[in-house]
Amino acid sequence: MLIFIDESGDPGLKMDQGSSEYFAVSLVIFEDEEEAIACDQRITLLRREIGWSADSEFHFRRNSHHARERFLKAVEPYSFFYYGIVINKAKLYGDGFKNKESFYKYACRLVFENAKDKLHDATVIIDHSGSNDFRHQLSSYLKKYMNDDQHRLIKKVKMQNSKSNNLLQLADYVAGVINRSVQRQKNKADGFRKIIAHREIFVQVWPK
């Protein structure tokens, strides 16, 4: 089992100074490695089809509506499923959320808890960001809360650069789609989500 994680928005709480109002984390899961490879290859082919260079990155926030639709329609036939959490930061309180790294780890924990029944011996791939110390902390944190003596839900956690990993780019797209859909006021908010709706297991909006 392969799991790819990415986020949309930022974990900062200073909305009056430019922080995003919402923060979303997506969990994209492939149970079959061959299906993951096939989806990866399809994304590579899509770059050529739309005339992009081989090192161009699919990034939901920066891409045009046309590119977004092409990407989502290209990946939707492949057998992955996803979970997500979208956090309304205006409703948060408590000092613990003021630390960005603690906030990010907690958001990851929430979405993993929702997916717990589906996980088994998974390799988790996360976008390569933050310090080495933070990446080590995040790996230990997830294993601590997901594994016990009877169950090893997470086998290992790996950090890779999203620019060179098509399936992390897929996770970025899913995070962007659910974030935009929850906010609703943005253009084509629900249309993008409908394209991949059959891949969605559960998206939590938190807190209520």
Image: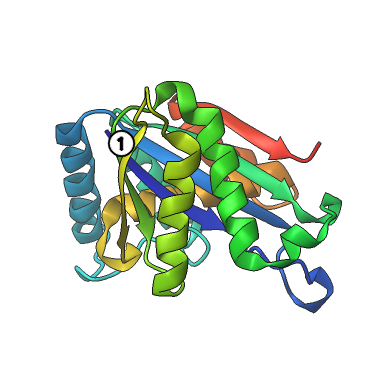
Please state if 127 lies on the left or on the right of 39 as rendered: right
Residue 145 image offset from top left, x and y in percent: 50, 39
Residue situated furthest front in the rendering: 149
Residue 84 can be seen, yes or no: no
Q: Which of 87 and 79 is in front in this view?
A: 87
User: Is residue 182 left or right of 67 when viewed as pictured?
Assistant: right
**Disc 1 marks which residue?**
122
Closest to the observer, 126 or 34:
126
Indicate the quadrant containing the C terminus: top left, top right, bottom left or bottom right: top right
Residue 101, compared with residue 89, is above or below; it is below
Q: What residue type is labelled 1?
A: Ala
Compared with residue 24, is residue 201 higher up or lower down, i.e. above or below?
above
Examine the image and state in which quarter residue 3 appears. Answer: top left
Q: Badge 1: how crowded within 10 Å, few (<14), some, or many (20+)?
A: some
Picture residue at 49% right of the left edge, 50% below the top? 141
Q: Which part of the image, by quadrant, shows the N terminus?
A: top left
Position of residue 44 measured from the top left corner of the image (x, y, whole percent): 20, 55
In this image, 103 relative to 98: left or right? left
Whole-percent x and y of residue 106? 61, 50
- Which residue does the image show at 34% across and 31% down from the upper left? 152
Q: Tell which of 88 and 140 is nearer to you.
A: 140
Kindly identify the residue that appears in the image at 37 percent across and 46 percent down.
Answer: 4
**Does residue 130 appear in the picture of this structure?**
yes
Secondary structure at numbered mark 1 = strand
Q: Give the residue at x 30% y 36%.
A: 122
Residue 140 image point, x, y percent: 43, 52
The figure's colour scheme reads rainbow
